[in-house]
Amino acid sequence: QVQLVESGGGLVQPGGSLRLSCEASGTTFRLNVMGWYRQAPGKQRELVATITKNLEPNYAASVEGRFTISRDNPKATVHLHMDSLKPEDTAVYYCKADIWGNYGLDDYWGQGTQVTVSP
C-alpha cells in the first residue's frame, strides 16, 4: 500500500509560478512511474507530466517548456514546477504513482490540490 499526499496548490496570477509536491509513504520501494494529472471543471482528467524511476520526464504538449517535473527517489517525492501559468491551467492537480504489486502495476492517486490562475 502507498499513500500520496500533495501540497503546494493555490491562487496565482497569469504569468506566475507555483510548485506542487507529492510525498509517497508506505511500500515506496515498489514505486515505478510517478506523475501529475489535472482535471478542470467539466473536463476529463488529463496527463500533465510523468517521470520514470530513471528520471526520464514526459510532458503534455500544452505544458512543455513551462512545467518541469522532478523526482527524489530516496525521499519518494515528485515535484511539479509550473512557470508562465495561464488561466487554462486552472484545475485540480492529482499526483499518481504506479506501484509494482503482486500481479502487476497498481495505480495510486493523491487527494488532489487546487490550482487557480486568475488576475
Image (cartoon, rainbow, N blue to C red):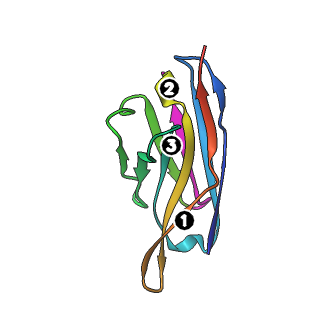
Which x, y percent locates residue 42? Answer: 49, 39
Which x, y percent locates residue 55? Answer: 41, 53
User: Disc 3 or disc 2, which is closer to the eye?
Assistant: 3
Q: Quadrant of residue 29?
A: bottom right
Q: Amino acid at mark 2?
A: Asp
**Is 27 covered by the magenta stretch?**
no
Name the secondary structure under disc 2: loop
Circles 3 and 2: CB atoms closer than 8 Å: no
Residue carrying label 2: 83
User: Disc 1 or disc 2, which is closer to the eye?
Assistant: 1
Residue carrying label 3: 39
| Depicted 54 relative to depicted 46: above or below | below
Name the secondary structure under disc 1: strand
Would you say residue 10 is visible in this rendering?
A: yes
- Where does the magenta region start and end? 74-84
Residue carrying label 1: 108
Crowding at label 3, few (<14), some or many (≥20) Cα neighbours within 10 Å? some
